[in-house]
Image (cartoon, helix red, strand yellow):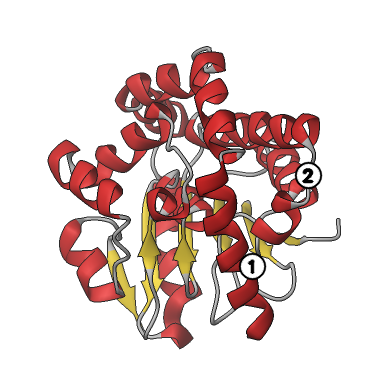
Amino acid sequence: MNTILVNVRDRLATITLNRPKSNALNREMIGELNDMFVNIAADDQIAGLVVTGKEPFFSAGLDLVELYGYNEAETESFWRQFLEFVQTMVSFPKPFVAAVSGHSPAGGCIIALAADYRVMAEGKYIIGLNEVPVGIIVPESIFELYAFWLGKAAAARSLLEGRLFQPAEALAAGLVDEVVNPAGLLTAAERKITKYMQLERNTWQQSKLNIRRSLIAASGANQDEMLDKMLQQWWSPATRHILETILKNLQKT
């Protein structure tokens, strides 16, 4: 694996996002993550999962530099792959805690949202869904995931303005569950997931799947019509202009 590190100890798997320099999600990374989620779900020797990154990033979201250069077929394939990955995470049956190690906008936030519990490092970091200002249409399945934690009204307001939250704001909004000193991030995540793992496995997992029934249905539904709209907007002059501006700014950093 080139983009993630995996460690298994005491029946707990830890995935560390490990793609320079900001853990931006490209096709390879999403593929490796999806495969690892599937493998961990099927492994009876693993009872829980923590996903983390490396300060100052959890994940900067989708790799817009790589994605911008895709042709139409590659772009459609990428978005299908990403939506499949969201479905895999949402329907992951075992305890899953996100240890949000830093900045986590857009796609990084979506990984965190799929977890059962989010611990975020304190600091000058941001988290949230900022796709709309970038010109990316957010599918209903991802809005439902956002609303699952924030509530529909707050999620709608935040999504439509592309709001990014600092850790304390994210905690107050219910976007994260705990904010801790970065040095204690993994300790806090492991403390929480250990509590989940100590409960009767089948009861816990079936209860989780019951609670998430509508999320699982939304992420698993046919999204071809929505994908068509996303792709039309992706190739629109307005979105290409926004992306070009973003890429120019990235090249300056």
Residue at (26, 39) in percent of width and height: 147
Residue at (18, 58) in percent of width and height: 173
Where in the figure is residue 124, as x and y percent of width and height? 37, 85
Residue 6 vertical placement versus 169 (above, below): above
Task: Find disc 2 in the rendering and name its residue.
Answer: 70
Q: Secondary structure at mark 2?
A: loop
In this orientation, which residue lies closer to the viewer: 204 or 28?
A: 28
Q: Residue 156 — which label?
A: none
Residue at (47, 72) in percent of width and height: 103
Task: Please tell me how many numbered marks the rendered image carries.
Answer: 2
Give, as a three-letter code, the residue at label 1: Leu
Residue 70 vertical placement versus 210 (above, below): below
Is residue 92 visible to us here? no
Is residue 61 visible to us here? yes
**Residue found at the very far front of the displayed protein:** 237
Give, as a three-letter code, the residue at label 2: Tyr
Q: Secondary structure at mark 1?
A: helix
Q: Residues within 10 Å of mark 2 (few under 14, many from 20)?
A: some
Task: Find disc 1 in the rendering and name its residue.
Answer: 247
Q: Residues within 10 Å of mark 1 (few under 14, many from 20)?
A: some
Q: Where on the picture, by quarter, is residue 207?
A: top left
Residue at (51, 15) in percent of width and height: 225
Where in the figure is residue 58, as x and y percent of width and height? 54, 68
The quarter of the rendered structure image containing the C terminus is bottom right
Residue 171 vertical placement versus 206 (above, below): below
Where in the figure is residue 57, as x and y percent of width and height? 55, 74
Where in the figure is residue 25, as x and y percent of width and height? 66, 55
In this orientation, which residue lies closer to the viewer: 88 or 129?
A: 129
Residue 14 is left or right of residue 2, and the answer is left
